[in-house]
Image (cartoon, grey):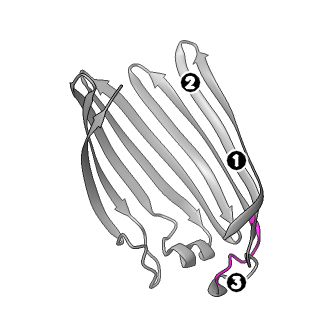
Amino acid sequence: MEGKNVFEGGLVYDGEFGGVGVLASVVGLYGELVNGAEDSIDDGGFGDDKWWGVQGGASIDLFGFKLAGSVGRSVVGDVENDFFTAGIGAALGPVNTSITYGQLFDTSSEFEEVNGIGDSAYNLVFSADVAIAPGLVLAGDVAAFDNDQTGDADSGTGDTGWTAVGSFRLSF
């Protein structure tokens, strides 16, 4: 599917309130779908040619912790979903750690048909990194997920599970 007349924008605030660091933003996109977007989903379309999304979020630095979250909505034709994210991060000595959670909380039946994922799919990620030498960082993530698969659709990653990854990264 291709888009036309696409407009994107965002507003960002980076400052302090009462000594607490605050970073907040709202971003959005609006456009039109082409190439048969009005066709039904069963015929390879999206049921409509509308395309838009909006997401707002904030992060605060408080007592050595960084707390963050966002909420958003995505609409591609009749394929709609609402989602949120939340996370907390902290430096514990030389180790940086974080926990992040994201979840769909409302989806249209068309979203479930196209993606095979229901309205309670989630992803939970535990992350950490540590500098092991100047300019070299050891990092890793462990994640648990539930795609809340619906019907016979296969998202390609299975319904539930966990993943892990580790890496060495150059840091300048």
What label does residue 38 carry, if any? none
Find disc 1 in the rendering and name its residue.
Answer: 28
For residue 120, above or below residue 78: above
Q: Say whether residue 143 is left or right of residue 33.
A: left
Which residue is nearer to you in this view: 17 or 6?
Answer: 6
Q: Earlier in the sequence, mark 1 or mark 2?
A: 2
Q: Point out the frontmost of discs 1 and 2.
A: 1
Placement of the C terminus among the 4 image quadrants:
top left
Q: Residue at x 40, y 44 (%)?
A: 100
Which residue is nearer to you in this view: 154 or 1?
Answer: 1
Find disc 3 in the rendering and name its residue.
Answer: 40
Residue 60, percent from left and from top: 51, 27
- Residue 9 picture quarter: top right
For residue 100, above or below residue 163: above
CB under 8 Å between callouts 1 and 2?
no
Q: Say whether residue 72 is left or right of residue 94.
A: right
Q: What segment is highlighted magenta in the picture?
A: 44-50
Find disc 2 in the rendering and name its residue.
Answer: 22
Amino acid found under the numbered disc labelled 2:
Val
Amino acid found under the numbered disc labelled 3:
Ser
Circle 1 Cα neighbour tier, 10 Å, few/some/many (<14 / 14–19 / ≥20): some
| Disc 3 to disc 1, C-alpha distance | 26 Å
For residue 139, above or below residue 122: above
CB under 8 Å between callouts 2 and 3?
no
